[in-house]
Amino acid sequence: MSTAAKRKKKMTKENWTGLAFIAPAVLLLFVFLFIPFLLTVGYSFTNYNILKPDKMQFVGVANFLRLTKDTVFLKSIINTFVFVILVVPLQVCLGLGLALLINRKLKGISIYRLAFFAPTVLSLVVVSILWTYIYNPNNGLLNSLLGSLGIGPFKFLNDPSTAMVCIVILSAWQGCGFQMMIFLSGLQDIPAYLYEAAAVDGARKWHQFWHITIPGLKNISVFVSLNIVVSAFQLIIQPMMMTGGGPQNSTMTIVYEIYQTGFKYNKMGYGSAMALIFTLLVLILTLIQNKITSKSNED
Amino acid sequence: MKKRMMSIMMTLTMAATLTMPAAVSAAEPVELTMWVHETDASEEGKLYAALAEEFNTQYEGQYHVTLSQIARSGDAGGYDDKINAAISNGGLPDVFTVDGVTVAQYADAEAIVPINEYFTEEELADFNPSIIQQGTYEDQLYTLGIMDSSVGLYYNKDMFEAAGITPATAEDPWTLAELQDAAAKLTTDDCFGINMHLDAKDESVIYFFLPLIYSQGANVIDEDGETADGFLNGDAVKNVFNWIKEMADNGYASATPAENSFELGNAAMDLTGSWEPGNLAKFDINWGLMPMPVYDENSTPASACGSWTFAMSSNCTDEKKEGAAELLRFMTSTDASARMYQANAMPPSRATAFDSIEAFGEEPLSVFSYQLQNTAQARPVSINYAILSNQFATTLQNILTGMDVEEALEQAVEQYNFQADIY
């Protein structure tokens, strides 16, 4: 009896300490994540205009019905998915490829490491502007380069069929340095004796990569791809700086459309409805991805 | 003795309490607050601070203004966010600056109030007509500007001489056909006839090209801004976009011009704003300035204008309104406007300020002074202006990337009407 009471008392004390530790994080989460999210849900059922807060009224599902007729928003959903589907494999492969390249003991390897990582540190706005110059159809670097090889010229960002691909390439280039670092640490965690044993058994480099490196990086790959998926869905800076969502809405993304509706047109209610749909889409995808990865982890 | 002291003391206290409030009200000035969109990191911001200080000296004991300078970041960050937040929580200052094209939305939201009654007609007559136009929403004047802006056709004098082309004068602008002829003559393998900044995807597109539509006596949206049908897809707009497309297709103007192509001699002309001379000073180029062209020989000249303005907020209480109006008058005075030209090279907002600056009386800047006092027409003062501006820029990119002009404009109308349809 007394021991049980004692344990109970001890437990509560520990609980309080624990709670005290997570309190700041929980508080911040509430203030900056949960409350804004709940407000967004609330606003999405109103006609809230930023400049006319007094005139806010409940409008039911009118905003959501309107979304089904909004051709640009529907296009932006497709565009965003196209971007995610293209950029995730590309960026994972680039990150892994670079990690493999620099995972060796060579003189001056840290210079390469720094060089490959550098784009990640640069501001995305700066990178976007720089690549706009590179992609310039008339006197851009890329067309001059391709021209000397007898290819092109291409219109890049000025052609609706290639604009999104251009943004994919620059985004993968900009982001892969970060994934490279994570893959690198993963590579260095794989015990060297596995490779030695495989070499003794006569396994070639390719087999070693396929049967040791890839399985060894499984957990890291899951983390990396989830990371890229989530940030890829939030694509806005590149189209905003480089194309303005054009040409012909080919690079308009969901978040850009939300920003434009909410902050440029001041139509916060309608923008909130878009944001809610966007959140649900990402949520569903994350759940699916979770299910797939946890299943493959059980194997 | 003691009693006497007491009574004296009491009389003194009474006298003090009686006179004190009167003394206080005479010395205590009306406290005003003002927000501006530039910090003292820029010359423009420094001028605002200096003007506020001078206002306090001049009206010492009567009015006192406290200035807050808030930086802008990007096109919706910083300053605009702060204003929007202040509208929600009722924290607007008495006076604040608003961009000319946003006057309608702030007036419609009742964040700013009409100021007609505080200014005489005589006073207002000194302002550029377009300053009054950009500040007027539903027949009420809401804002006055310290500065204005304009767009002209800059040209390379040496190239013009070599090609034997005579530039247009301020009063007699070129038609688009004349401009196209000149551009054709000036275009060579490594030089475009003109840089029209066709890569722009922002506000500058409508700012640069709207005068060509105005010059045909047409508009881009209806009077209330409710629909663009019959306007944005009208003949006048089609004419202009068709012409732009022709210029790009013929290679007279680049659809994706390189940075500083006019300044570096890779374009013979440059259609751009009144801020350009400052940039040109950094290059070795012999340049001149022509007025904004008109559509054809039947057109009336029209030109671009507009800039940041001062407004009185709905938060300004009745007892403060006289003071706030006095502050508006002070911030947009002839002296302030002329000094703004010295600070950031923006053309003045009023005739007397133009007269006081020698540079505007002679070439090349006389073109701007003529345009702003005679041909300038403000962009539509509409709550849906942001949507219009965006659709205008989108249309330009769409037609330059292969979409048919008619189709692009129909799409723009459809999008404008769809976006403008709700609250």
Image (spheres, coloured by chain):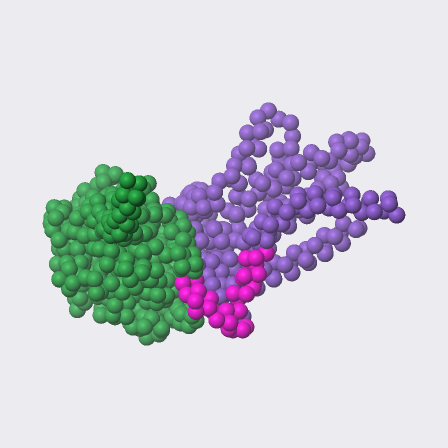
Chain colours: A purple, B green
Closer-to-camera residue (B14/A188): B14
Please give left or right for residue B334 compared with residue B240 in the image: left
Is residue A133 among what the camera can see?
yes
Could you say which quadrant of the image residue B137 lies in? Answer: bottom left
Is A19 a magenta residue? no
Please name the residue shown 17% across and 66% down the image.
B300
Please name the residue shown 25% across and 68% down the image.
B140
The range drawn in magenta is A34-63
Please give left or right for residue A146 compared with residue A279 in the image: left
Could you say which quadrant of the image residue B299 lies in? Answer: bottom left
Please name the residue shown 31% across and 47% down the image.
B67
- B402 to A134, vertically: above or below: below
Residue B40: image x %, image y %?
A: 31, 42
- A192 to B302, vertically: above or below: above
Is A47 a magenta residue? yes
- A148 to B85, vertically: above or below: above
Please name the residue shown 28% across and 40% down the image.
B1
Closer-to-camera residue (B402/B316): B316
* Residue sitting at the far bottom: B230
Closer-to-camera residue (A240/B338): B338
Residue B288: image x %, image y %?
A: 17, 47
Please give left or right for residue B96 compared with residue A176 in the image: left
Closer-to-camera residue (A23/A60): A23
Residue A50: image x %, image y %?
A: 43, 62
Is residue A71 among what the camera can see?
no
Residue B87: image x %, image y %?
A: 40, 60
* Residue sitting at the far right: A1
Count of number-bearing discs: 0
**Figure quadrant of the C terminus of chain B:** bottom left
* Residue sitting at the far top: A107
